[in-house]
Structure formats: C-alpha cells, structure tokens
Image (cartoon, grey):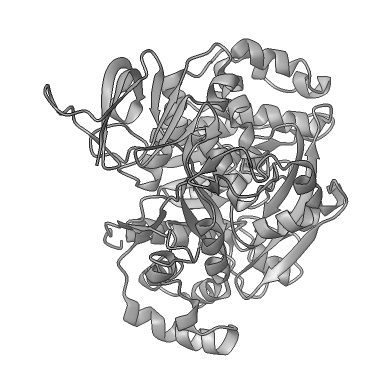
C-alpha cells in the first residue's frame, strides 16, 4: 500500500489537544501512522499548506434509513421531482462506468444521495437513531445501500410489549439487562433509543398523552420506570453510548419540566437527551409559548452525566418522520402539504410522517429556531452537545454549513434574528449572547465529541492508529461556504471528494456493539413470546453477521461489520 503525506496543514484535533499547529500527517493502508522519519519512501505528497485539517465529521442523530424514512420518501414525491441533482452524471466516468447512481431529494434524499451529500460536506459517518427491532433487516438493507459513510443504528425500545410485560411483572434488573443485551446483538445496533417512553404503546390503547409519572394504560407502567430501567441496563451492560432518549411531551408548551423530570429519572446514570430544542418550551407570555432554554441549559451545565444534541430548526420545507405516533397524530393538522401517515408496527412501536414547513414569520417556528441556538450557546461544555437538526425533522442535514455559520459568526446571527417574526425576536435572549464558536469547538461538536460518545476510539481524531477519515478546508470568513465545500475528503485513506464534488465511490462500515448477557435466561421466554404474539420466529428475527458482511444485505459484497466490545459493569 502507498504511504501518503499530507504536508503543512493546520491540525485541529481536539481529541489530542491540537488547536491549529502546523504539521504533516501520514496515511498508510487506510490508517493514520506516525511520522516514518527521514529517508522513508513517500509515494504521494499532497500539499495542504495553511489549510485546516480535521477528522471526518460524524452525525450522531440523523434519520437516514428504515421504515419511516422510506414512508417519507414515498409520501414526498414532489421532493424527488423537484430536487434531482444526483441523476446520472453522464460527463463523469470511472473505468467506463457512471460514477454516481441516480438519486435525489433534499429533505427525503435517496440512499445514494444521502451518502453523496454527506461526503461532499466532509462527513464520513452518520447514525440512524430509531430502528424498530422488527424492521431491523429493512433498515440495514437501506444503510447497506448508502455509499460513502460509516453508519450504525440505535434500537428503539420503551414501548415494546415484551419490555412492558417485564416491568409490569416486576422483573429484576438483571432480566431487563439480558433482554436489552439480546436486542442489541440480535438487531446489530450500537445503542438503545427510547421514544416518548411508554407513549407509543399508550397511543395503541387510545391514550393521547402520557406524562412522566402517569401509569400507561393496560400495563400501568410509568415513563419514569421505563427510563430508569433502560438507563440502568445500558449502563450495566457497558454500552459506550448512554440511553438515547426522546422525552415525553415533545413539542408541548411547558415540557421543559418533563425534561428535568427525565434527567432526575435516570438517577445519576449517564443519559443522552436528543433533539432537546423540541423539549425546552415554556408557557410564558400572551401566547403561552416561550423559551425555557436557559433553565434547561443550566441543569445540563451542572449535570455532567447528561449529554445532548439540539435538533435545530431551520426555515423552509421539510418532513417530520418520527416513531412518536402520539405526537405525529397530534401534529397532522399542521401538515404542509396536507398529507400524512401514521402506522402501528407489530407489538413494538409505531411511526408517523407529517410534512411541515417552518416559517420565519410564524411566532412559534421563529422561536423554535431561536431556542435551538440558545441551547447551543448556553450549554458550556462542547464535549456534551452535538450538532444536529434531527434530520429531517428540524431541517435537512444539508443545512449544517449554515448552522455552523450561525454558531461561529455573531454578526451574521444577529442579522438573521432581525429577519424573523418580531414578537419571537423580542421573546428570545439570543441577541444578547456574545459567544462565538471556534474552529476547535466545532471540531468537538462534529467530530471528537460524537466519536467519544459512541465509543468509536479510532474515529473522530487524527492521532496515529486512527482510521484515515479526514476533511481538509481552506479557511474562509464565510464559514457556511467553508464547511459546504471542503478541499479534500478522505475515507479510509482514499480521496472521495474534492472541492465539494464526489470523486470516488466507497462503502463504509456498519458499527454494532457486542454486550455480554445471559442468553439462556432470556431466550426461552422470548421464544414463547414470539410463538404466541409475533409474526416471525425468534431465529428469523435476528440479523446475522453474514447478512451484513460478505455478500451482505446490499447483495454486492460491500458489507463490513465493525464490532465494539462492551465492558460490563456489575449490577447494583
């Protein structure tokens, strides 16, 4: 394999404490290697003098595959008719073949377009945060069809019948741990997600809301009990990423109190609160809708066991796609265009797809935009907050460069604030916040932080032994332009994009954890449960390693599975 030297770049690598020092990087066999010393045979030198060198970016929460994503693609036909920049590029050939496959869409991009657009922005990994276990094989098949990036999935629990039965019967924590461990292995997931704990199940019994300490219908289990049990299971199994939680009462004014109850419900265990913008609403003012970002940020700042991503709202058309059937049913009256779908999924969960347009002159939408930015700027520790739009719920991931400019450029942010609804602008403290993110902090939000949170020890940094996923930028005053079109993007040591254009098609790996659990104690009751209530048998439910690797779900032999061990913590 060739030895490549990236010469003279400014290294921005927070995981290794490097903040712009000038140095060379060496790549060999898809990895970053130490300086080989004088006299080494360098096969290729790429001059990046003065350019900003970062690890490839990692999106910790982006809905890019699975049942609800496919429903969103199907329902938003106008997105694909109107946005097809990735149709066959007949002027660009690679060995006689068209370089890129056809694909389109902005807020519901195809699998191909998803991978291409991420790579063009300097992203080398993205994680699907809500895989229903019954749909795992479908989800992995879609992700196998997504080029350019590494990926992984969070298995969705918390409204599934089997877990609720365990909790209702008073099962002890080790039994719950075994079930969670079994699910992680069976569906090839890297983390556990809970959506509106208990609320999806409650909706099936005609419940239209479920508050944190309210017993759900039928099983009588509270969301607090679900959160406590799952947070403890994830922690005791040693899964690197904490329980990834979409709180109850999403979008409801006053829900910031539910957010604080959820933090308390974890009983000091690690917890990741996702798309927190949608859970930081107060009830102040004539409209009974206000920002509670300051109160929420204050609690996050003093609770080191909590990490968050924001789910930033950006203005324009998008589509909301969520496992939170209760919330999506409530919001269907706001659909734009006027079409929507909600559905039940086995005995496990549900989903809803509702198109939506965020308007800068709408008071609620404008304040949502401001609340997200308030959270970004008021949460002090950049290692515990990650850059997301909850794609596509708050906005497409392709808006990330614009969001980065809002965080880095106070003047630009204030100019944008002047354009939104005047009552909303008057209801936010955004204009008084002086903070501007540095390049170093952006690298934490988008690289080092997500890698650490997911336990990806060889990603998100530029030290020797790291996978050579690298993005190189020319620094510009306009940070949106800078982050939209990197000079170079490397995946596994190969140049896959230059100046914002894909140059080579590659296929990333799938990441999954391998926790230890007592298989014998959990498989017998699971087998009985599957025989009685499910439409598949236990053995057919599992997604095997071989389905992802070798021939793979893609059918083209491009699958690769990276298994991450877990360090089990003794049950307390």
Q: Where is residue 216 in the image (x, y as percent from the top left)?
A: 65, 67
Q: Position of residue 568 (x, y in %)?
A: 28, 60
- Depicted 527 relative to depicted 22: above or below: below
Q: Nearer the viewer, residue 532 or 501?
A: 501
Tell whether 144 sits left or right of 269: right
- How many numbered tags mark residues here? 0
Quarter holding the C terminus is bottom left
Q: Nearer the viewer, residue 287 or 439?
A: 439
- Depicted 78 relative to depicted 201: above or below: above
Q: Residue at x 49, y 66 (%)?
A: 555
Note whether residue 266 is visible.
Answer: no
Q: Which residue is drawn at 31% across and 41% down?
A: 467
Quarter holding the N terminus is top left
Q: Where is residue 452 in the image (x, y as percent from the top left)?
A: 36, 41
Note whether residue 239 is visible.
Answer: yes
- Depicted 127 relative to depicted 68: above or below: above
Tell whether 191 sits left or right of 314: left
- Depicted 38 relative to depicted 211: above or below: above
Q: Which residue lies furthest to the front in this view?
A: 96
Displayed quadrant of residue 523: bottom left
Q: Position of residue 233 (x, y in %)?
A: 40, 62
Q: Which residue is drawn at 48% across and 15% down?
A: 475
Displayed quadrant of residue 324: bottom right
Displayed quadrant of residue 285: top right
């Amino acid at each position: 394999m060739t030895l490549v030297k990236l010469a003279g770049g400014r290294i921005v690598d927070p995981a290794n404490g490097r903040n712009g020092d000038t140095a060379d990087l060496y790549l060999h066999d898809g990895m970053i290697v130490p300086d080989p010393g004088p006299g080494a045979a360098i096969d290729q030198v790429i001059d990046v003098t003065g350019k900003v060198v970062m690890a490839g970016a990692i999106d910790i929460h982006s809905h890019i595959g699975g049942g609800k994503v496919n429903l969103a693609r199907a329902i938003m036909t106008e997105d694909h008719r109107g946005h097809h920049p990735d149709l066959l590029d007949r002027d660009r050939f690679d060995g006689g073949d068209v370089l890129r496959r056809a694909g389109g869409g902005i807020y519901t991009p195809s699998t191909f377009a998803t991978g291409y657009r991420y790579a063009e922005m300097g992203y080398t990994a993205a994680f699907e945060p809500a895989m229903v276990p019954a749909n795992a094989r479908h989800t992995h098949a879609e992700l196998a069809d997504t080029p350019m990036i590494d990926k992984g999935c969070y298995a969705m629990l918390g409204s599934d019948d089997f877990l609720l039965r365990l909790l209702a019967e008073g099962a002890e924590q080790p039994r719950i741990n075994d079930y969670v461990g079994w699910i992680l292995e069976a569906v090839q997931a890297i983390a556990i997600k809970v959506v509106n704990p208990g609320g999806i199940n409650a909706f099936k019994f005609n419940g239209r809301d479920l508050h944190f300490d309210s017993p759900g219908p039928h099983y009588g289990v509270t969301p607090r009990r679900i959160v406590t049990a799952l947070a403890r299971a994830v922690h005791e199994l040693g899964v690197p990423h904490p329980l990834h939680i979409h709180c109850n009462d999403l979008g409801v004014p006053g829900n910031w109190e539910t957010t604080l109850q959820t933090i308390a419900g974890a009983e000091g265990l690690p917890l990741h609160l996702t798309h927190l913008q949608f859970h930081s609403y107060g009830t102040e003012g004539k409209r009974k809708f206000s920002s509670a970002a300051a109160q929420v940020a204050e609690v996050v700042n003093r609770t080191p066991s909590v990490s968050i991503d924001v789910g930033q709202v950006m203005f324009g058309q998008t589509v909301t796609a969520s496992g939170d059937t209760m919330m999506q049913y409530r919001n269907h009256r706001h659909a734009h265009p006027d079409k929507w779908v909600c559905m039940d999924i086995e005995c496990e969960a549900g989903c809803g797809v509702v198109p939506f347009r965020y308007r800068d002159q709408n008071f609620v939408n404008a304040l949502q935009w401001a609340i997200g930015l308030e959270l970004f700027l008021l949460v002090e520790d950049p290692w515990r907050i990650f850059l997301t739009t909850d794609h596509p719920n708050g906005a497409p991931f392709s808006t990330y460069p614009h969001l980065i400019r809002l965080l880095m450029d106070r003047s630009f942010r204030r100019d944008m604030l002047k354009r939104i609804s005047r009552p909303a602008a008057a209801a936010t403290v955004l204009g008084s916040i002086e903070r501007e993110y540095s390049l170093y902090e952006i690298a934490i939000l988008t690289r080092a932080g997500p890698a650490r949170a997911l336990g990806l020890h060889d990603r998100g940094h530029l030290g020797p032994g790291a996978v050579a996923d690298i993005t190189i930028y020319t620094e510009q005053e306009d940070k949106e332009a800078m982050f939209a079109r990197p000079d170079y993007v490397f995946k596994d040591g190969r140049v896959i994009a230059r100046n914002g254009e894909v140059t080579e098609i590659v296929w990333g790996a799938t990441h999954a954890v391998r926790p230890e659990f007592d298989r014998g104690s959990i498989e017998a009751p699971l087998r009985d449960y599957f025989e009685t209530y499910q439409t598949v048998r236990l053995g057919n439910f599992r997604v095997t390693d071989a389905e992802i690797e070798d021939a793979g779900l893609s059918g083209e032999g491009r699958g690769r599975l990276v298994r991450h061990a877990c360090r089990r913590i003794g049950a307390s």
